[in-house]
Amino acid sequence: MNYLIFILTGVLAAWLTFFISERLKQGPVRSSALLSLVVGLFFYCFPELFGAYLSKNIPLVFIGATFIGMVSPLSRGNYIRLAVAASLFGIIYVNKAHFFEGYGGALGALAFIALLSSMGFSVIISRSPRLKKGIVKVRKKVSRPSK
């Protein structure tokens, strides 16, 4: 059940951050900070609403996932890729959060890993003509004998 809660929290955080940043023109840093502040204050004021474990970790997952939502739309950021990256972030957080204890920027590092992985997956499974055209160019260069 915690997996599902963390995944949904991550997806919501990434989507809201991206939406507020791009559609409401608030910028990525301001939207991430505003949403993180609201969620952090909510769980600070109502810690008994969920269990102790969830009250401690939901704000951390939310803050980390807002880093995913800070992606630029120029880097082909869209809501599906954000959802995949945020889901991956939630799964990694539940399973490997203890590994990153003591590292400064652990949430940012996890967000980077999740976003980079989701971008890589989308390139691998992409069937776009642009990608195929690039692969053909690389093959021609590689197969051409050097002078």
Image (tube, rainbow, N blue to C red):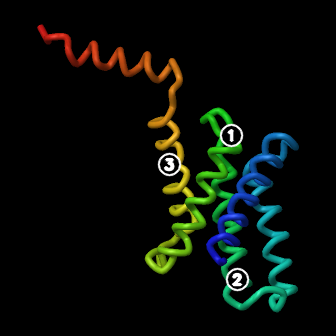
Name the quarter where the N terminus is drawn. bottom right
Amino acid under label 1? Asn
Q: Is residue 47 visible?
A: yes
Residue matched to label 2: 54
In the rendered structure, find residue 131 and report the number of the disc placed on it. none
Residue matched to label 3: 116
Disc 2 + disc 1, Cβ < 8 Å = no
Q: How many marks?
A: 3
Amino acid under label 2? Leu
Q: Is 146 positioned to the left or the right of 111 in the image?
A: left
Residue 94: % across, % down: 55, 75
Residue 55: % across, % down: 74, 84
Residue 87: quadrant of the picture: bottom right
Residue matched to label 1: 78
Disc 1 + disc 3, Cβ < 8 Å = no
Q: Count residues near mark 2 (Cα–Cα under 10 Å), then give few for <14, some for 14-19, many for 20+.
A: some
Q: Is 71 positioned to the left or the right of 140 in the image?
A: right
Judging from the image, what secondary structure is the residue with disc 1 in? loop
